[in-house]
Image: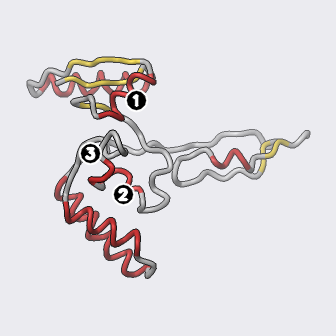
Amino acid sequence: MTMKTSTEESTRLLAAVLQQQLREVGIALDIRTFESATFLADVTSGAFQFYSLRWIGGNEDPDIFDTVFHSINIPPKGRNRGFYSNPRVDILIDQARRESDQNVRKRLYAELQERLAQDVPYVNLWYFDNVLVHTKRVRRITLNPSGNYNFLKMAEISSQ
């Protein structure tokens, strides 16, 4: 099996760990490292067997399910990079996106998550913890649970 990865250190280290763990169960993993533009172009077009990326800001709204799992978003049109297709999942996503009643949306997304848990279109290995360390001079910053860096827009540095 071949894993494409970027030159980013944490991604290369992950690939090496996966290679070692897979070797222990008899699976050979060939790691191919590419500069970011080439790596993302291959992933975006679906030219891979195995890769690793992380989502930043994908947990703020369930609309991310459309981006990642709806069959209309299979590359090159979208980010359903695993080429996942399930007609019931498409219907649930479409219904939930049109629904304004939050209780109905909640039920639709709950069923959608159950379907995805059964199908396992991809596996989340972990979520990074964001930790913020700063001096007292830096004010008005609060980490966003999504992991994005929007909190920097509000940051202020005092002269004292």
Q: How far apart are marks 2 and 3 (CA)?
A: 17 Å
Disc 2 target residue: 66
**Percent of width and height locating residue 3:** 26, 25
Name which of mark 3 and mark 1 comes first in the sequence: 1
Name which of mark 2 and mark 3 comes first in the sequence: 2
Provide the secondary structure element on which disc 3 rests: loop
Q: Which residue lies furthest to the right in this view?
A: 160
Position of the C terminus, as image quadrant, is: top right
Provide the secondary structure element on which disc 1 rests: helix
Disc 1 target residue: 40
| Label 3 neighbour load within 10 Å: few <14, some 14-19, many 20+ | few
Q: Is 160 on the left-hand or right-hand side of 28?
A: right
Disc 3 target residue: 123
Position of the N terminus, as image quadrant, is: top left
Q: In terms of depth relative to the viewer, which is nearer, 140 or 97?
A: 97
Q: What residue type is disc 1 on?
A: Leu
Q: What residue type is disc 3 on?
A: Val
Q: How far apart are marks 1 and 2 (CA)?
A: 20 Å
Q: In terms of depth relative to the viewer, which is nearer, 9 or 20?
A: 9
Q: Distance between the residues labelled 3 and 1?
A: 19 Å
**Percent of width and height locating residue 21:** 20, 27
**Percent of width and height locating residue 110:** 30, 70
Seen at 26% across and 53% down, the residue is: 71
Q: What residue type is disc 2 on?
A: Asp
Seen at 17% across and 55% down, the residue is: 119
